[in-house]
Amino acid sequence: MIDDGQVERDGFGGDRPEVMKSARTRGSAKAKVGERAFNEPAEPLALFDVSAQSEEPQPVEVAVPVEPVEEADTGEVESTPVQANEPETEHITSDQHAAADPSSSEPVEAVSEQETVPVEEPASLVASAPTRLFFLTNRMNLIGLLGSRLLAPRESFRKYYADLLELSPGWVPLLVGPPPVQLIERVVAERGASAPVLVELSEAALNGKRLDGRVVYSRAVALADVKAIHFPDEKSLREHRSRRYGNVFPHECLLRVNPELFSTESDAEVVIAAPMEAPETDWSRIDRVRGAISAAMAAADNGEALAVAAGLLGATSLPKDTIVPPWLSWSGLTGEVAEPTSETDEERADRLIFRAAYRVLGERDRSESWSPSEVLKAAVAEIAAANPSGEVNAIIERHLQRVRELVNVERDFERFRNPGSQYVAAKSFVTVLLRPDLGQLLEWPVEETGIDETTRVVAAVLAGRLRGVARESVTFRDAALDDYTAAWAIQTAAGQTSTLGVVEFIADDDATAVIVGGVRLKTSLPLRSR
């Protein structure tokens, strides 16, 4: 802390000539925080001084699970074969009601094996049969769907095996009823695609669309709308179960074996073609935004950090000493925010550094190459393009020079000084340049870094932006939050501006929590000041 009349030191330990008195904080007085107790129902919906994822099935065999290993994404898939001495797990059949997926608190419609409601069907369908909705793909593409918890067009896949998505660019073709043989053959034609898979969806996936044929097209579908995942035989399911992926949540309750769905005899041709040209959607950017939001919540390991993450999501009633920079907001991370009409030189410098780092990291892929110095140079060029004024540019250069010295190993690493300093962006940027992996960043002891809660959350945002959500380990993700951001992605692809919903931060003597749309999303330690 800084006494009046004392020269304030910036977050890197360097002296600066004046005390910044316009630092932005959000929230009300502490007395207002936690006015609602935890047992009440929710409303509906760094470190250093740088100066110094029906029909009865046939009986199946016993499957053997294994422990999670490497991540599986739409890129390279790594797995571990099943071990013979692992405990046995009984196969789930369609006459068994699966328990809820323990990995998720379902903020949206819960994944369950519920009976679909019959709707008026076109003459081409059997009038007495209930409507069943399927997405046909192969096992390798299924892994990408499970990793991102979002079924999106072909453009959203990093690693892709030919299926029906390539026939309808920008759209997801959903089949009304089981697929004909010719479509099944198509999705397994590419070498390495593995077995065909039918993902059965609830009618919520239609988003109000009326069924008027054998195919209905959607822009995207959330994994929360999946009722079951069907395999054609026991061997195919054993192959799927024999591997576990670090970025895929447990989903045993969805797995079924149903050979009848893959043996439909029909001479009727089912044509898959895009109904119209879809609006251009940057699915990579959407994944990176989801990753940033997810990582911010992962960094909230105490009440103070959870308050910062809540403020990012849109909560307004926060502890009075919570520091949430103006640029650290939902609209700021999703790219829907306008330039501020008024800000100090210090605020503008901080915002330009963060915005440049956020944009540049969103364009990098560590699995292909990673150079901290190259990332820093790209960020500097991004800032220069904004043409900051002389004083703003001087502030930026002072901070980035210290970042440059650390990245180039020209200065020894030291703890951040002056915790709570408003100069957050540069400290967060250097933290992620030194520890770009989210897990390693979050495991960096505070005793070594001296990092404050706001800087820690912002650094996590940048690390999440770098990796995205689909490839991130479920260790640092929450399935409920992933489903909220998947719903946001679907609305974004439809050209709609949206938020996660009403966000609240509550606190009492025992804990703190973030509530989104009436669902308690995360609970953390109580505030230190209570």
Image (cartoon, rainbow, N blue to C red):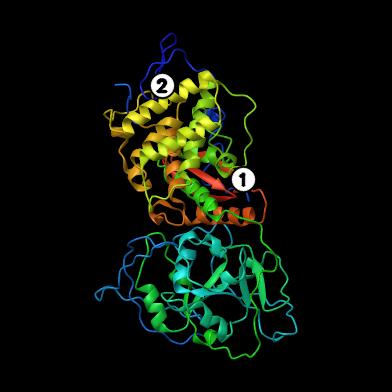
Q: Is residue 285 left or right of residue 118?
A: left
Quarter-wise, where is residue 340 in the image? top right
Residue type, numbered disc 2: Asp
Quick one: label 2, few (<14), some, or many (20+) residues within 10 Å? many
Question: Element type at marker 2?
Answer: loop
User: In this view of the protein, which residue sits in the foreground, 4 or 346?
Assistant: 346
User: In this view of the protein, which residue sits in the foreground, 159 or 217?
Assistant: 159
Tell me which residue sits at (61%, 65%) in the image.
Answer: 169
Q: Is residue 264 left or right of residue 18?
A: right
Tell me which residue sits at (70%, 69%) in the image.
Answer: 275
Q: Is residue 5 left or right of residue 150?
A: left
Quadrant location, the C terminus: top left
Q: On screen, 443 above or below 447?
A: below
User: In this view of the protein, which residue sits in the foreground, 26 or 349?
Assistant: 349
Q: Position of residue 132 (x, y in %)?
A: 62, 78
Q: Position of residue 207 (x, y in %)?
A: 67, 64
Q: Which mark is residue 502?
A: 1
Q: On screen, 243 above or below 284?
A: below
Please say whether residue 97 is visible from this viewpoint: no
Residue type, numbered disc 1: Val
Q: On screen, 436 above or below 91?
A: above
Q: Which mark is residue 10?
A: 2
Quadrant location, the N terminus: top left
Residue at the far top in the pictured view:
5
Q: Position of residue 12 (x, y in %)?
A: 37, 24
